[in-house]
Image: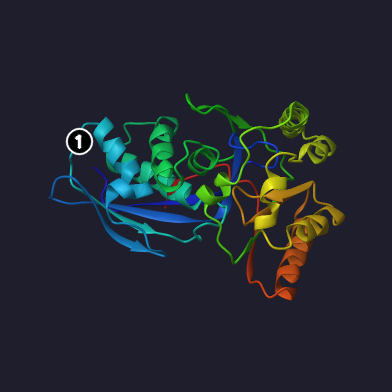
Amino acid sequence: MAVGIKVFAPASVANVACGFDVLGFALEGPGDEIIITKTNRKGFKITKITGGKLPYDPEKNTAGFTALKIMEHLETDIGLEMEIHKKMPFGSGLGSSAASAAGAALAINIALGEPLTKAELLPFAVLGEQIADGAYHADNVAPSLLGGMILIRDTKSLDFHKIYVPDGLHVVVVHPHIEILTKDSRGILKKEILLSQHIKQSANLAGLILGMQTSNYELIKNSLQDDIIEPQRAHLIPHFYKIKEAALSQGALGCSISGAGPSIFALCDNSFIAENIGNSFKKIFSENRIGSDIILSRINQEGTRLI
């Protein structure tokens, strides 16, 4: 068995405008680091947490619960200790809890000799993230763990499919320094939608996937629209529509809320446009006395990895 396993689990953008709870992609950074070491004492223990206040009780910790479930599945009580180094903000809309769960899943699996594939680790990571927001969904966990842009066709069975990503696609994300918890952002959503909304949203999701598969940027642009969730959550994010207008006016293919917010993402067909939009995002929040961070990235195809 390996000793001193260290893995990196990346941030992710979920929903991608028209794919609420079923679509997400991984970023190159930021992300969490998870370290697993062997001990002579049987069982599992979290020994160190940096970057945020999280419970040390594995049953109440996303990374810890993921680890426990994997060890239970493999019927092992071998001595393992975990360190969790949070290197991304909580409540950011960038899949912070998902990254911790994905990192724990891969680290534990490597430490135990890799008995499971990455795909087989996914259900355990989803259970881990559920500890944080109370919802069973994989649109952050799957891309964080597996990399790429991923469609979750069926959440219950975790039937997922990786979507082709055009080479020129770039992402710009702005994270304003405010916090929105996923469970709070989900709590304001209506339980029912109009048939007309469903039809339009379904067409946009299909169009986005087809546009990605065929590198049709015009189709991607026409499809990156959210007529259901974004209008309900936009008021939670200061200056959201000003940010969106700035992105679209400068050539973004689309712009919407990342996950539950407050982060906002824009997809672009080249890095120059992404950089200019990022500068505009930063300026808008700065002028309104809100600190922010800008992330420029391609879509990360590797996901969680050993470092």
Return the residue at label 1.
76
Q: Is residue 212 left or right of residue 179?
A: right
Q: Residues within 10 Å of mark 1 (few under 14, many from 20)?
A: few
Observer able to see residue 132 = yes
User: Based on the displayed image, in which of its 4 quarters is residue 210 positioned?
Assistant: top right
Q: Secondary structure at mark 1?
A: loop
User: Based on the displayed image, in which of its 4 quarters is residue 291 positioned?
Assistant: bottom right
Observer able to see residue 113 = no
User: Residue 117, image x and y in percent?
Assistant: 40, 31
Q: Is residue 110 left or right of residue 259?
A: left
Q: Is residue 141 left or right of residue 256?
A: left
Q: How many marks?
A: 1
Say which quadrant the N terminus sits in. top left
Taking depth in this image into account, of 90 and 161 the one nearest to the observer is 90
Residue appearing at x 81%, y 39% in the figure? 217
User: Residue 88, image x and y in percent?
Assistant: 50, 60
Residue appearing at x 20%, y 35% in the figure? 76
195 versus 239 height, above or below: above
Residue appearing at x 68%, y 38% in the figure? 165
Taking depth in this image into account, of 290 and 1 the one nearest to the observer is 290
